Amino acid sequence: MRPRQYSTPPQLDEVFEKIRNERNLRQGQASNLKGRVAEERVLRAALRLCEETDWLYIARLATSKEDESGIDVVVYSSIGKLYIQVKSSHCGARKFRSKRPLAKVIVVIVDGAMSSTKLENKVYDALCRLRCYFMREYV
């Protein structure tokens, strides 16, 4: 005996597609919001570091053009602009690096539950590493 072939009625396919699209939209909006909050936290940490550190001047969120090239936060320093990309996971950081292996951008992974102090230390460490990289490259 052959198994029965089942085909979904077109109306049911339309309903399932609509549900999938709505779910994807909600998940995308939630992800975008999570990323925006993380970027703003990194910006606040960078601004605090600028007040405390003599080689860091000011920080800002990236322009839309900079954002398209993989930059989330720009920090002006004594050696020029330092670029930060904010990610919420190691997987996201690896994907970013695989797409842009030569980018002169430091990736900072931000966990939503991370304390402000830990985040500030992480951002400072990242900026120090990027600064050392550029100083070695230009000397």
Image (cartoon, helix red, strand yellow):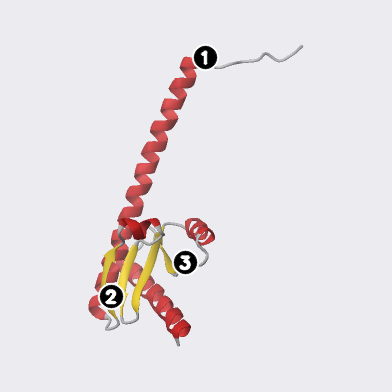
Whole-number angstrom distance, CA of label 3 to CA of label 2: 23 Å
Q: Residue furthest front?
A: 65
In the figure, residue 46 lies in which quadrant? bottom left
- Mark 3 touching mark 2, by CB under 8 A? no
Q: Is residue 32 above or below residue 75?
A: above
Whole-number angstrom distance, CA of label 1 to CA of label 3: 49 Å
Q: Which residue is mark 3?
A: 103
| Residue type at numbered disc 1 | Pro
Q: Is residue 106 above or below residue 23?
A: below
Q: How many marks?
A: 3
Instruction: Tell me, for residue 54, which label it has, or none.
Output: none
In the rendered image, the quadrant that contains the N terminus is: top right
Query: How packed is label 2: few (under 14 Cα within 10 Å), some, or many (20 or more)?
Result: many
Q: Residue at x 25, y 80 (%)?
A: 52
Q: Secondary structure at mark 3?
A: loop
**Residue 133 appears in the rendering:** yes
| Residue type at numbered disc 3 | Ala
Instruction: Tell me, for residue 9, which label it has, or none.
Output: 1
| Residue type at numbered disc 2 | Leu
- Mark 1 touching mark 2, by CB under 8 A? no
> On the picture, is 31 further left or further right than 2?
left
> On the picture, is 117 further left or further right than 134?
left
Q: Which residue is mark 2?
A: 49
Residue 21: image location, x then y, percent: 42, 32
Q: Secondary structure at mark 2?
A: helix
Residue 85: image location, x then y, percent: 40, 63
Whole-number angstrom distance, CA of label 1 to CA of label 2: 60 Å
Mark 1 and mark 2 lie on one chain; the one further toward the N terminus is: 1
> On the picture, is 36 further left or further right than 129?
left
Q: Residue at x 39, y 42 (%)?
A: 28
